[in-house]
Amino acid sequence: MRESFKKIAIIAHDGKKAEMVGFFKDHIDQLTGVEIVATGTTGSHLAKAGLEVDAKLSGPMGGDAQIAAMVAEGDIDAVLFFRDPLGKHPHEPDVQMLLRLCDLYDVPLATNPASATLLLNGIDVIKAKAKVE
Ligand SMILES: O=C(CO)COP(=O)(O)O
């Protein structure tokens, strides 16, 4: 079980970007003190919403692959990926690689807002526990 969440990755497919921005505006307090890495366009949306973001390449240009490599190197503590199950994505192999590496390295992965809410609440519990200890 992970004991600290210093850096998280945020990614959203185009069909989920509006929902993703609304979600993170609502959960901005839970991101205090957490570094955010994002794919390119997701990152620019988050930056516009006032978050500090390390934006990688756009997803179809290799951004998911860059984040997957960070997962493999142990540099990412959780991935919040707002996937669009109804869209077609030219870089689907990169997406599958990212999901696989999260499972391989046991990195918490949320692929929809409901699970992202639970993940962020879980991070809060771990943060609170670390303060008490
Ligand atoms: O394609 C993506 C996820 O697979 C997201 O990439 P962008 O954030 O650059 O749109």
Image (cartoon, rainbow, N blue to C red):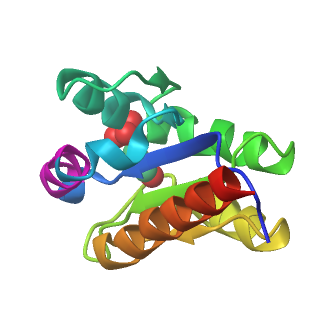
Figure quarter occupied by ligand 1: top left
Q: Position of residue 59 (x, y in %)?
A: 46, 40
Residue 37 to residue 82: above or below: above
Q: Is residue 38 left or right of residue 19?
A: right
Residue 112 to residue 32: above or below: below
Between 3 and 10, which is closer to the camera in this rendering?
3
Q: Position of residue 24 (x, y in %)?
A: 26, 48
- What range of the chain is rendered magenta? 17-25
Query: Quick one: quadrant of the N terminus?
Result: bottom right
Between 50 and 111, which is closer to the camera in this rendering?
50
Between 105 and 2, which is closer to the camera in this rendering?
2
Q: Position of residue 6 (x, y in %)?
A: 65, 40
Looking at the image, which residue is at 75% across and 74% down? 103
Looking at the image, which residue is at 31% across and 26% down? 51
Residue 35 to residue 30: above or below: above
Looking at the image, which residue is at 77% across and 42% down? 69
Whether residue 93 is visible to the viewer of this picture, yes or no, is no
Dominant SS of magenta comes to helix
Between 5 and 17, which is closer to the camera in this rendering?
5
Residue 50 lies in the magenta stretch: no
Q: Position of residue 113 (x, y in %)?
A: 30, 70
